[in-house]
Image: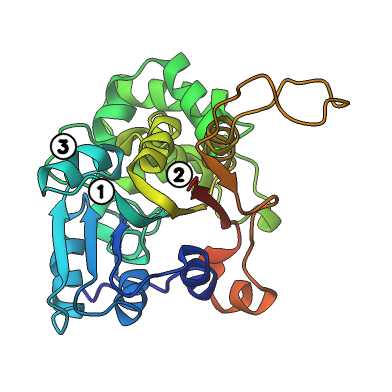
Amino acid sequence: MEFKHKPVMLHECIEGLKIKEKGIYVDGTLGGAGHSKEILKHLSKEGLLIGIDRDEEALQTAKNKLKEYENVKYIHGNHDDIKEIIEEIGIEQVDGILLDLGVSSYQLDERNRGFSYLGENILDMRMDKTQTLTAREVVNTYTEEELANIIYEYGEERYSKKIARNICEYRKKEELKTTKQLVEIIEKSVPKNKKEGHPAKRTFQAIRIEVNNEIKPLYETVRKCINCLKPKGRLCIITFHSLEDRAVKKAYIDAKGKCTCPPDLPYCVCGVHSEGKIITKKPIIPSTEEKEENSRAKSAKLRIFEKNK
């Protein structure tokens, strides 16, 4: 299957990175290489792009799409380990980092990966096929309380308790092995509401986030990324979930630092340490046109941070 991916807020990301021709940039979520290709167009041969992805199929596709460029390093890894990754290749700091935290169109559309609630496929949902935890293990071994909490917190699903209870009742009789089995349980647990789309959407999102540990390390990952930037370097992060956005926003605020001096003092005396400034006071969202053209861009938010001089 062709790895299709329409990069979200492409122009806004390129503008946000303020690319230098000879700079070093990291695409921590290489995916379909849409953002990376545009970054490379702005780099000279002396510049360098480091592309990281936990999905080996994505990396191979990116290599094919970017084969005309020689100034790319491809890394099979997780953006959570960005500091260790760039140090391993002999780089201390970079000029810019981009993280697009959305699951790729390919992964959603490639049914045998188990991300989609359409059709019948094995319950997998791993972005990195080398990891051990799968969706099948989550739904068959987690307690009812753990499942309910995950589905509520990560999926924002108000029927989480009923879904978790019915999953546990089902698995007493037989193991859940396929996406179709899980969808049927969810459909019996959630009242039909055409306005909210497919009833399994929220639960599948929640299980995917749990399987790939997408939320818990995010705050620390953002702080690591800022630490990896050169002076005046930029960090651009696109989120698609309220919990992701909240973690990014908090990390940016904490990195900026907060002055505790009384407002009537003419200058700061509290000695607050600031790592940089937040470029986007409010997150940038896709244009109406982009949302209409790419439905997966609808919940996207872009936040930008700049390292101090």
Q: Residues within 10 Å of mark 1 (few under 14, many from 20)?
A: many
Q: Residues within 10 Å of mark 3 (few under 14, many from 20)?
A: few
User: Residue at (53%, 33%) from the top-left corner?
Assistant: 255
Q: Is residue 89 left or right of residue 4?
A: left
Q: Quadrant of residue 22?
A: bottom left
Q: Is residue 259 above or below residue 204?
A: above
Look at the image and tell me whether residue 271 can be seen.
Answer: yes
Looking at the rendered structure, the secondary structure element under dot 3 is: loop
- Alpha carbon separation for disc pair 1 and 3: 9 Å
- What's the amino acid at mark 3? Gln
Indicate the position of residue 168 as horizontal and vertical percent values: 39, 21
User: Residue at (60%, 63%) from the top-left corner?
Assistant: 298
Tag 1–tag 2 contact (CB < 8 Å)? no
Indicate which label's residue lies in the foreground, 2 or 3: 3
Q: Residue furthest front?
A: 266
**What residue does disc 3 label?**
131
Q: Is residue 208 left or right of residue 110?
A: right
- What's the amino acid at mark 1? Met
**What residue does disc 2 label?**
205
Look at the image and tell me whether residue 101 can be seen.
Answer: no
Indicate the position of residue 263 as horizontal and vertical percent values: 85, 26
Q: Quadrant of residue 261?
A: top right
**What residue does disc 1 label?**
127
Indicate the position of residue 283 as horizontal and vertical percent values: 65, 54
Q: Is residue 34 above or below residue 190?
A: below
> Which quadrant of the rendered structure holds the N terminus?
bottom left
